């Protein structure tokens, strides 16, 4: 069975993984740069690419060591080439090219967002394979990818075929989490902090807007502005302190309720539109407890299976990249050394 080394450097996580047969992780590393970027309240591209450069080789060596395999035993090199920060993607791609030249292994370009979708399927597929049961999900799937950089819906027809049917017209959901957390002084990344705080708050304390742009698209900038006005007052100057009456847990819970409402409603509408046999929720925000619970409840009501990644597979990692690389390699979707990165993908 195919042994793939996956590399992921599209944003602020330096990751490597060895995956066998598309589902079985033999070893992996994720070196997070969160601490480096926290004091800026967001990812600084130049710092991120320099940090990838330092962290990637040690991550590869440790991953191979944990997996107990040498480069010579691998069947392919899967690397994220789109979408992401160009300088960051280039570190992963250049490293993969160097390894491809020195080993003769095929180079498999991977779309990071498709990787997130595949990451949601991996736990289920691994379980089925272990039991010797068929591991084909009920295609087509309606797939929601929600992270710091993306909020999109896809019609997924196989591990490698995903057609985008909606996207955000402004902020990504994770970005909205990070910005709302920043304006309440909760630190970076904001998603986990708001998720925790929301448990002690009343989701009905504030009636935040649920924007519904055309089609199945998303919009979060109006919600973010509404939260800003609620916590600092409507005409407060930049950097004004929080209003004394603000109860942060209530703001967090009400904001989260609005985000989850929008995401789940549109996912269900997408499922209906494409006649989906199942649902996927993936990306960093798929680690959110309220989103997981609501998606599971709505999926259950409709009798649709819901594919969710483990927490480790929800946020950026290379296991999903190596896993998807297996299927791409099987389809012969390899690339030559002219391969380049692309900041935005369709
Ligand atoms: O997928 P990811 O690791 O990186 C990107 O591709 O963007 O997603 C990171 C995003 C951040 O915005 C972070 O705040 C959000 O995922 N996030 C969460 C939670 N854990 C991470 N958002 C809400 N609730 C969480 N528990
Ligand atoms: Zn991601």
Image (spheres, rainbow, N blue to C red):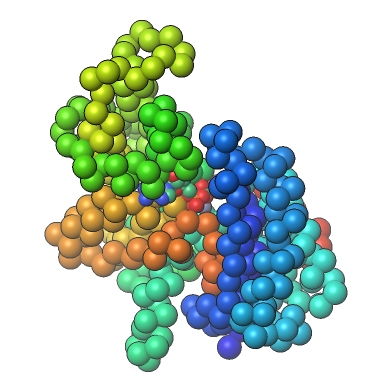
Residue at x 72%, y 66% (from the top left corner): 58
Displayed quadrant of residue 207:
top left
Seen from the viewer's position, the closer of residues 292 and 339 is: 292
Residue lying at the far bottom in this picture: please name it.
132
Q: Is residue 44 left or right of residue 324?
A: right
The x and y percentages for residue 160 are 52, 66
Residue 6 seen in the current view: yes
Is 44 situated above or below 274? Answer: above
Residue at x 76%, y 84% (from the top left corner): 72
The x and y percentages for residue 142 are 35, 57
Residue lying at the far front in this picture: please name it.
244
Seen from the viewer's position, the closer of residues 142 and 311 is: 311
Could you tell me which quadrant the N terminus lies in? bottom right
Displayed quadrant of residue 200:
top left
Residue at x 37%, y 55% (from the top left corner): 287
Q: Is residue 128 left or right of residue 268?
A: right
Is 220 situated above or below 310? Answer: above
The x and y percentages for residue 245 are 23, 20
Q: Is residue 103 left or right of residue 49?
A: right
Q: Is residue 33 left or right of residue 173?
A: right
Counting the numbered discs, the total is 0
The x and y percentages for residue 43 are 59, 40
Seen from the viewer's position, the closer of residues 95 and 104 is: 95
Residue 150 seen in the current view: no
Residue at x 46%, y 13% (from the top left corner): 238
């Amino acid at each position: 069975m195919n042994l793939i080394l996956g590399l992921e450097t599209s944003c602020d996580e330096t990751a490597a993984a060895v995956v066998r047969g598309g589902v079985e992780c033999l070893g992996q590393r994720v070196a997070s740069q969160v601490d480096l970027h926290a004091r800026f309240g967001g990812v600084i591209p130049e710092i991120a690419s320099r940090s990838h450069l330092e962290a990637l080789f040690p991550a590869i060596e440790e991953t191979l060591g944990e997996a107990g395999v040498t480069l010579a035993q691998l069947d392919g090199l899967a690397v994220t080439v789109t979408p992401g920060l160009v300088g960051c993607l280039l570190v992963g791609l250049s490293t993969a090219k160097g390894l491809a030249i020195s080993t003769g292994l095929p180079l498999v370009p991977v779309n990071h967002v498709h990787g997130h979708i595949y990451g949601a399927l991996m736990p289920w597929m691994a379980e089925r394979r272990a039991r010797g049961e068929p591991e084909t999900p009920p295609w087509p799937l309606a797939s929601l990818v929600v992270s710091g950089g993306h909020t999109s819906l896809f019609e997924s027809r196989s591990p490698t075929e995903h057609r985008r049917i909606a996207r955000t017209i402004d902020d990504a959901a994770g970005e909205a989490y990070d910005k709302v957390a920043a304006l309440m002084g909760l630190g970076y990344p904001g998603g986990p902090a708001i998720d925790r705080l929301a448990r002690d708050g009343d989701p009905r304390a504030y009636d935040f807007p649920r924007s519904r742009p055309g089609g199945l698209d998303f919009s979060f900038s109006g919600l973010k502005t509404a939260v800003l006005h609620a916590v600092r007052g409507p005409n407060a100057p930049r950097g004004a302190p929080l209003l004394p009456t603000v109860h942060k847990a209530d703001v967090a819970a009400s904001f989260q309720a609005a985000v989850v409402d929008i995401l789940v409603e549109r996912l269900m509408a997408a499922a209906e539109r494409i006649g989906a046999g199942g649902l996927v929720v993936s990306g960093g925000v798929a680690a959110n407890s309220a989103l997981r619970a609501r998606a599971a409840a709505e999926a259950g009501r409709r009798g649709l299976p819901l594919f969710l990644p483990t927490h480790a597979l929800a946020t950026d990692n290379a296991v999903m990249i190596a896993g998807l690389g297996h299927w791409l390699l099987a389809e012969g979707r390899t690339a030559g050394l002219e391969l380049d990165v692309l900041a935005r993908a369709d």
